Amino acid sequence: MAKKQFKAESKRLLEMMINSIYTQKEIFLRELISNASDAIDKIYYKALTDEQLVFDKEQYFIKITPDKSSRTLTISDTGIGMTKEELENNLGVIAKSGSLAFKQENEAKDGHNIIGQFGVGFYSAFMVADVVTVRSKALGSEEAFQWESKGADGYTVKACEKETVGTDIILKIKENTEDEQYDEFLDQYRLKAIIKKYSDFIRYPIKMDITGKRPKEGEDNEFEDYTEEQVVNSMIPIWRKNKSELTDEDYENFYNEKHYGFDKPLAHIHVSADGAAVYQAILFIPENTPFDYYTKEYEKGLELYSNGVLIMNKCADLLPDYFSFVKGMVDSEDLSLNISREMLQHDRQLKLIAKNIKNKIKGQLQSMLKDDREKYEKFFASFGRQLKFGVYNEFGANKDDLQDLLLFTSSKEKKLVTLDEYVTGMPEEQKYIYYAAGESIERLEKLPQTEMVADKGYEILYFTEDIDEFAIKMIGKYKDKEFRNVSSGDLGIEDAESKETDAEKNENKDLFEAMQGILGGKVKEVRASKRLKTHPVCLSTEGEVTIEMEKILKAMPN
Ligand code: ADP
Ligand code: MG
């Protein structure tokens, strides 16, 4: 029988695949199980409209069978199967013409590998197998066919014997080489672990015959072999369960199981969205700052599932940078594993979900701030700095979303206050929101400049983090009130009595000039001031950039 060639494009893509486009070989199993599950879905959907067809759940399952002696791994399903034509069309041609172009385009754009993200499914089998044999009998057909391929050079199709409707995919697992191990894909426990990891939530049972030894009944020190058919996957994802059925502990277990963190989450958000974007999500706000959080090494992202199948470990597009601390997962039926389908649509869908998620997180933080201040302050101690960066970055584009989530230490009782609380507490005549910036609260309290403002009974916000003043400059005004550094030249509270008269200004003119001479170019002017109470001298600035900001700007790498 003549060997048919893969279409040229398929061949190229196949070669790229085999040259490990996927970072982990083990995902081939996820892909094949997902195809098997899709095939059962197809019968399920058919049964919904076809009265002749009854979907009896018991009959539908996926079975994984490793065989060390023949070095094969078989993935069987009782799904819809493939006709001869379907075997040729679906397995002989990779995707449609768009996929390769799409990949190239995307690689050029951000170096990202979209195929690795969405899978080209079936072909990933060649990462672990020398030969792939597909034996399939389509629903409603009397004949079965066998498709076989050794990789990039083509495939054969012939008639074969198969009793039941469905598909068997038989992988001839590669031999170990010096660099690569393949034996693990014949090991029942390893396979079980891979299934648990990627396919736990597949809706149909994934069965395996697990073999082992057990003590023989009635006999001491004697063991017998046994084989037990097990269902490896749990089938019901926690995110599909009803919130009312779940306890905080369930969510905490999930958080730990998923290795989102070693701490306990401060809060969780369980979303079941039915609107323009249909998806479920479980999101966590961790309690502690991950050790690498404020470094370049930290990678944000949520796990992305397509209909119960994990397709991406860290989907960065789902989270804005300022909420990069959020952990969790999103499952959407609208996202497909199939890269050959409308990718643009995926993107749009993903954007919609991302926007939705952003608002959920914001809402959760807002209500935490309102209802559980203590918890919120814990959160803010871990991640508040990131929110301030969020206000500052992107030229303040996100400040409206974030400014009400900020907390600053106030000079009054050294409590943390929101900007809203500050402004609400302002006496009527107070013109500005005052702040002092410096290394520590202790130092700021001793700052001569704070005296006059504090004397007036006005509250001062203490800024002790580099980012504080930059973030506030980006906010500009809060509820129509401008921010003023207490060391700025114009505090807006100089009344008649505190204004220096011309006579006073000129009184010690010679002395001031001499002082300025000694200080050289370090100060612009030395003059008398009524702003000082108990301190003999203070530094003050004019214009936008304050002393603290100047220090930070100077320390920044260019
Ligand atoms: P995708 O699943 O994204 O469509 P794949 O490369 O994983 O892409 O599979 C290609 C096609 O082959 C599927 O769309 C399906 O039509 C067919 N197919 C693969 N595996 C099976 C199976 N077990 N049963 C029925 N059809 C299958
Ligand atoms: Mg697939």
Image (cartoon, grey):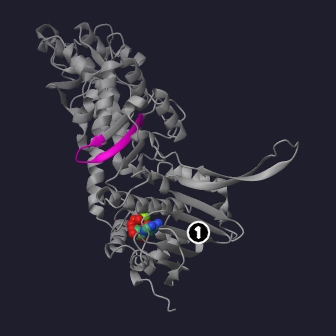
In the depicted structure, whether residue 167 falls above or below residue 434: below
Q: In the picture provided, is 544 more to the left or to the right than 553?
A: left
Q: Looking at the picture, how far across and down is residue 321, in whole percent? A: 35, 43
Q: Residue at x 67, y 59 (%)?
A: 187
Looking at this view, name the residue that lies furthest to the right: 220
Question: Could one spot residue 245 in this view of the protein?
Answer: yes
Label 1 crowd bin: few (<14), some (14–19), many (20+), radius 10 Å: many
Q: Looking at the picture, how far across and down is residue 297, in whole percent? A: 49, 47
Q: Nearer the viewer, residue 331 or 266?
A: 331
Looking at this view, name the residue that lies furthest to the front: 52
User: Ligand 2 sits in which quadrant?
Assistant: bottom left
Question: Could one spot residue 391 in this view of the protein?
Answer: no
Q: Nearer the viewer, residue 312 or 545?
A: 312
The residue under label 1 is 128
Q: In the picture provided, is 487 more to the left or to the right than 213?
A: left
> In the image, is residue 279 part of the stretch drawn in magenta?
yes
Looking at this view, name the residue that lies furthest to the bottom: 2
Q: Looking at the picture, how far across and down is residue 117, in whole percent? A: 42, 60
Q: Which secondary structure type mostly characterizes the magenta part of the structure?
A: strand
Q: Nearer the viewer, residue 28 or 231?
A: 231
Q: Residue at x 50, y 56 (%)?
A: 61
Residue 431 placement: quadrant: top left
In the depicted structure, whether residue 528 falls above or below residue 217: above
Q: Residue at x 52, y 58 (%)?
A: 62
> In the image, is residue 326 part of the stretch drawn in magenta?
no
Look at the numbered disc 1 and give the secondary structure of its residue: loop
Q: Please state the extent of the stretch shown in magenta in the rendering.
A: 273-284
